[in-house]
Amino acid sequence: MARIYDISLLISPVVPAWPGDRFVFHRVEEIAKGDICNKSVLEIGSHIATHIDAPYHFKPDGMTVDRIPPDVFLGPARVVSFPETERIDVPEIQSISLSGVERILFKTRNSSLWREESFREDYVYLAPEACRVLADSGVKLVGVDYLSIEEYGVQDFEGHHILLGKNIPILEGLDLSEVEPGDYELIALPLKIAGGDGSPARAVLRELPHTQ
């Protein structure tokens, strides 16, 4: 049986979050208190933990998350690792083969940051020119192992504009710490939120038969 890797973050009030994002969990009915069932109310940011950025996130006329075809989030994906770099730029992209790659996930030292409860500003990011190479390569989806593809503090969000401008959703907040570089099957479906700029997603990787 093919091994499945859960690369999603646990959504909780203490998960590292982008400044301003939050998750609130409130139990409104509880069996232990005499209610007939357990029932909760959630207040959750659309870009909390493991999530999808839809083109509408940065493009006023871009596709909302409910309009993205589901098959974008299902299918072959390549995990590539850059454990030492502080920024993924064109030379890093040129060092890997993108031939036939439909979905690419970047594993960096970021995956070790999930052991901390506070947000880190010094995460590894994708340079805009690297995003341009990816966008021109024909990939359907780009994934990273922290909460943004951009360098913290940028104002123009050029990388997002490049990828989302070509209708390439971005999968952020992955935990790839247990995953070796290679080819897998990705399943990372967002919620079907009407008009959504993004959505939390449950992301898993499944080993392909030849990798067992």
Image (cartoon, grey):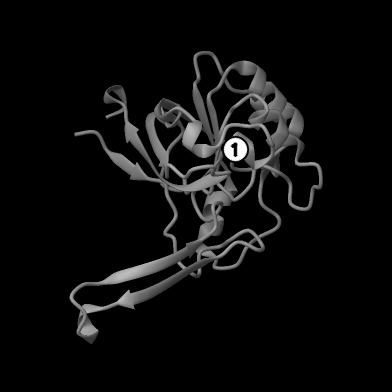
Q: Does any portion of residue 163 appear in the rendered image?
A: yes
Instruction: Describe residue 47's horizontal placement relative to residue 178 as left or right.
Output: right
In front here: 204 or 98?
204
Quarter of the image for residue 5 reads: top left
What is the count of numbered marks? 1
Q: Residue furthest bottom?
A: 33
Instruction: Describe residue 124's horizontal placement relative to residue 71 as left or right.
Output: right
In front here: 123 or 156?
156
On the image, the x and y values in percent for residue 125 come to 68, 43
Instruction: Describe residue 202's horizontal placement relative to residue 158 as left or right.
Output: left
Q: Which residue lies furthest to the top in this view?
A: 99
**Amino acid at the residue labelled 1:** Phe
Query: Is the residue marked by circle 1 packed among few (<14), some (14-19), or many (20+) residues within 10 Å?
Result: some
Secondary element under disc 1, as helix, strand or loop, is loop
In front here: 190 or 117?
190
- Which residue is at 55% across, 22% downward? 139
Above or below, comparing residue 40 to residue 156 in the picture: below
Instruction: Describe residue 171's horizontal placement relative to residue 34 as left or right.
Output: right
- Which residue is at 44% across, 55% downward? 9
- Which residue is at 54% across, 52% downward? 46
- Which residue is at 56% across, 57% downward? 113
On the image, the x and y values in percent for residue 1 come to 19, 34
On the image, the x and y values in percent for residue 142 come to 56, 32
On the image, the x and y values in percent for residue 157 come to 75, 41
Above or below, comparing residue 64 to residue 109 in the picture: above
Q: Does any portion of residue 85 appear in the rendered image?
A: no
Above or below, comparing residue 67 to residue 29 in the picture: above
Q: Residue furthest front?
A: 194
Residue where numbered disc 1 is placed:
82
